[in-house]
Image (cartoon, rainbow, N blue to C red):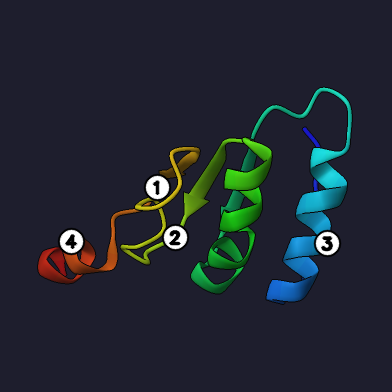
Amino acid sequence: VVFGDTKGDPATAVGEFRKVTATDGVSAVYIFRGPLGMAVNPLSKQSRVPLLGGIGNKAFAQQNQFAFQVWPPSDVEGRFL
């Protein structure tokens, strides 16, 4: 397990994603919070690194075959709540 601190900032999340994925043996990344996940999503697709997201944004996994939503999309969560 390799940990990167995004400090809740999308630009920092992009830098941490790049740093973490450059580490030998990293085969997937988990990220939590919508703005952070959406910021690194294109990098996941480009680098073909699986991205597991605790992200409620329903568009998170739509355009990236390497993105996996591990939190219900906002529309599903809203109906549930």
The residue under label 4 is: 76
Where disc 3 sits, the SS reads helix
**In this orientation, does residue 34 appear?**
yes
Between the C-alphas of marks 1 and 3, the distance is 21 Å
The residue lying toward the viewer, choosing from 48 and 11, is: 48
The residue lying toward the viewer, choosing from 45 and 71, is: 45
The location of residue 32, given as percent across then percent down, is 56, 59
- Binning the other alpha carbons within 10 Å of mark 4 as few (below 14), some (14 to 19) or many (20 upward) gives few
The mark that comes first in sequence, 4 or 1, is 1
Which residue occupies 44% across, 60% down?
55
Between the C-alphas of marks 3 and 2, the distance is 19 Å
Question: Residue 49 occupies which quadrant of the picture?
Answer: top right
Q: Is residue 38 above or below residue 20?
A: below
The residue under label 2 is: 55
Between the C-alphas of marks 2 and 4, the distance is 12 Å
| Front of the two marks 3 and 2 | 3
The residue under label 3 is: 15
The mark that comes first in sequence, 2 or 1, is 2
Amino acid on which disc 1 is placed:
Gln
Quadrant of the drawing holding the N terminus = top right
Amino acid on which disc 4 is placed:
Val
Please tell me the numbered disc located at residue 69. Answer: 1
Q: Is residue 60 above or below residue 29?
A: below
